[in-house]
Image (spheres, rainbow, N blue to C red):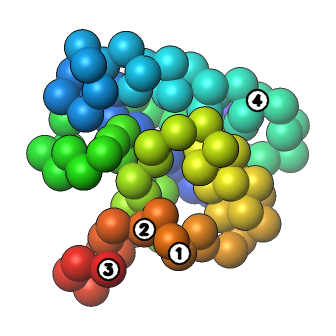
């Protein structure tokens, strides 16, 4: 297992996008974005439905406990660049924070 300081879980459908196709494509894109930053210590894991399908797919960053609505590649790119790499949450796409209820 690669050394990591953050663990990203991402829903790969099937409910959030038709048949899970877009969700799976986004999960694969997430891998490309992470692998394209060799110094980034992030592990990603495919998950099935988180049961909060709000224009998914849903992406969760741990240990931060931040849940994102990840409705397209531009949002995914921002999360990787700004949150995973830069340490700054992308607040307008957060749907939940661990321990705080609805954001």
Snapshot quadrant of residue 9: top left
Q: Residue at x 23, y 78 (%)?
A: 102
Q: Split into 4 quadrants, where in the image is the N terminus? A: top right
Residue 38, compared with residue 32, is above or below; it is below
Query: Label 4, on which residue?
Result: 35
Q: Nearer the viewer, residue 30 or 45?
A: 30
Residue 52 image label: none
Query: Are there few (<14), some (14-19), or many (20+) residues within 10 Å of tag 4?
Result: some
Residue 21, compared with residue 55, is above or below; it is above
Distance of mark 1 from mark 4, alpha carbons? 24 Å
**Left of 28 or right of it: where is 64?**
left
Q: Residue at x 18, y 51 (%)?
A: 52
The answer to whether the residues at label 2 and label 4 have Cβ atoms under 8 Å apart is no
Q: Is residue 9 visible in the rendered structure shown here?
A: no
Query: Label 1, on which residue?
Result: 91
Distance of mark 2 from mark 4, alpha carbons? 24 Å
Query: Label 2, on which residue?
Result: 94
Q: Nearer the viewer, residue 13 or 87?
A: 13
Q: Earlier in the sequence, mark 4 or mark 3?
A: 4
Distance of mark 4 from mark 3, alpha carbons? 30 Å
Residue 103 image label: 3
Q: Residue at x 26, y 19 (%)?
A: 18
Residue 44, compared with residue 14, is above or below; it is below
The answer to whether the residues at label 3 and label 2 have Cβ atoms under 8 Å apart is yes
- Image position, residue 70 (x, y; %): 46, 47
Snapshot quadrant of residue 20: top left
């Amino acid at each position: 297992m690669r050394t990591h300081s953050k663990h990203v879980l991402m829903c790969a459908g099937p409910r959030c996008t038709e048949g899970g196709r877009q969700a799976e494509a986004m999960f694969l894109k997430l891998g490309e974005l992470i692998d394209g930053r060799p110094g980034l210590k992030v592990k990603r894991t495919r998950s099935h439905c988180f049961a909060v399908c709000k224009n998914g797919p849903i992406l969760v960053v741990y240990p931060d406990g931040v849940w994102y609505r990840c409705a397209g590649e531009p949002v995914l790119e921002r999360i990787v660049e700004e949150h995973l790499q830069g340490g700054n949450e992308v607040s307008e796409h957060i749907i939940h924070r661990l321990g705080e209820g609805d954001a």
